[in-house]
Amino acid sequence: MNDWNEKHPNKIMKWGNAESLLTLIKDAHKPIADKFCSGCGVELQYIDSEIALNIIHSLMQQKIVALPVHDSFIVQKKYRTTLIEEMKKQYKNVIGTDNIGIK
């Protein structure tokens, strides 16, 4: 860490080392602290990919082109509502509930 601090004097790591950082993160997120480094992140990424593939497949069947970008989709403006409804539908199909908090 000292080498890093010397090479980057304007970006000193105030949290110390990786273990200290992980402790800070767990302290800040107590309700899910036991999930860090548990492997559940990979499982959640898989679930997310299943939802995304279902959305793309369904839209393709409707002749709607959807461009996936990270965790969202780009469609023609006229298909915005269709996309949103399809996202909700596929979320419910995979997760089993339609209790979604959309930001």
Image: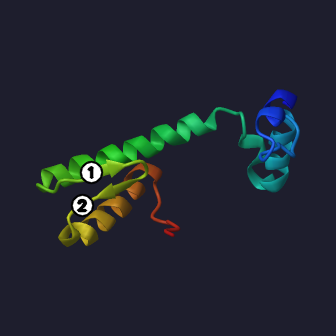
Residue at the image position 50 percent from the left and 40 percent from the top: 45
Would residue 87 appear left or right of 42 to someone viewing this image? left
Q: Considering depth in this image, is 11 or 79 the residue closer to the camera?
A: 11
| The disc label shown at residue 26, or none | none
Asked if the residues shown at circle 1 and circle 2 are in contact, with their CB atoms under 8 angstroms apart, the answer is yes
Would residue 24 appear left or right of 35 to someone viewing this image? right
Secondary structure of the residue carrying numbered label 1 = strand
Q: Which residue is mark 2?
A: 75
> Closer to the N terminus: mark 1 or mark 2?
1
Residue 69, percent from left and from top: 36, 50
Q: Check disc 1 and give the amino acid type.
A: Leu
Q: Which quarter of the figure is the N terminus placed in?
A: top right
Residue 62, percent from left and from top: 13, 56
Quick check: can you spot residue 55?
no
| The disc label shown at residue 67, or none | 1
Count neighbours of disc 1 (C-alpha within 10 A) and say few if under 14, some if 14 to 19, many if 20 or more: few
